Amino acid sequence: MASSSPLSPILLSLFLVFICGVSAQTAPAPAPSGPLNFTGILDKNGQYTYFLQLLTQTQVGSQVQTQLKTTTEGFTVFAPTDNAFNNLKPGTVNNLDPQQKVQLVLYHVIPKYYSLNDLQFVSNPVRTQAGQDFGLNVTGLNNQVNVSSGVVETQINNALYQKKPLAIYQADKVLLPEEFFEAKSPAAAPSPATKKSSTGSKSNSRASATADEPASADNSGSTGRNMGLGFVVGLALACMGFLS
């Protein structure tokens, strides 16, 4: 019985390796992922129902999605969780007018891409999409990032998506703009001195008017006496002329 050649297994192995290599080279590349979907990322991660509703109602979600196709700076979004909205005082969001709701959502969007590491070195205040006056203060220390609106402060450490041009970070609190809570200064109440001065002025006016009334009466009486005297003198002269 003929013995098998020891080279046969080796040759077979080399042949299989060659075939696998050729197959790997000719295999099609994986299909590219679909277009970046801003709201889809939030929806996939769950627990962002309220924020997604606001993004839809205010149309900010579609605006960001459209701008992602052309932006060179990118966007950074702080996405409040459902628990963050549940922890707000009742009516905090519902009592906002439509413009304020838009500003609230835009206040969570920074018109520039920042990685978590970048956020530790930004210059404050950081401008948001809500406008020049709606800024955030971002501080970082030892890889820990805190974001403050002046009313609310929260820690940022969970990146839902972090690849330019979009970074989305979980926010455990809703960032309420300080501008929404600035009390309008009431009309200044008159001071006691002003009230006293005003009362004194009224009293002086009444006194002046009272003092003027007798003077007017005296003048009227004097005018009457002068007219009577003139009448008598004129009558006497007329009589003298008649006698002569």
Image (cartoon, rainbow, N blue to C red):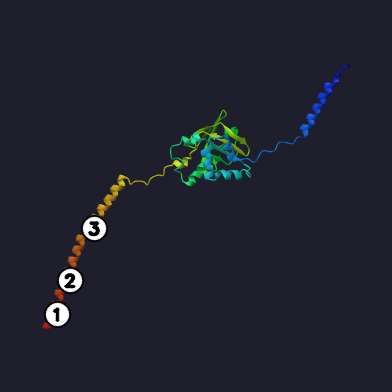
Residue at 57 percent of width and 45 percent of height: 62
Of tags 2 and 3, the one toward the viewer is 3
Image x and y of residue 135, in percent: 52, 40
Amino acid of disc 3: Ala
Q: Which mark is residue 209?
A: 3
**Residue at the (21%, 57%) spot, across then down:** 210
Q: Amino acid at mark 2?
A: Met
Q: Which residue is at a point 58% across and 43% down the rendered structure image?
A: 64
Q: What residue would you read off at disc 1?
A: 238
Of circles 2 and 1, which is in front? 2
Pointer 2 or 1: first along the chain: 2
The residue at the far left in this view is 243
Q: Which residue is found at the position 48% from the left and 45% from the top?
A: 100
Labelled disc at residue 227: 2
Specify few, some or many for label 3: CA neighbours under 10 Å numbering under 14, 14-19, or 20 or more: few
Task: Please name the amino acid that badge 1 sits on.
Answer: Ala
- Compute the Cα span from label 2 to label 1: 17 Å
Dot placed on the residue nearer the N-terminal end, 3 or 1: 3
Spatial CA distance of label 3 from label 1 is 44 Å
Task: Work out whether residue 21 or residue 5 is closer to the camera in this orientation and state it.
Answer: 5
Q: Secondary structure at mark 2?
A: helix
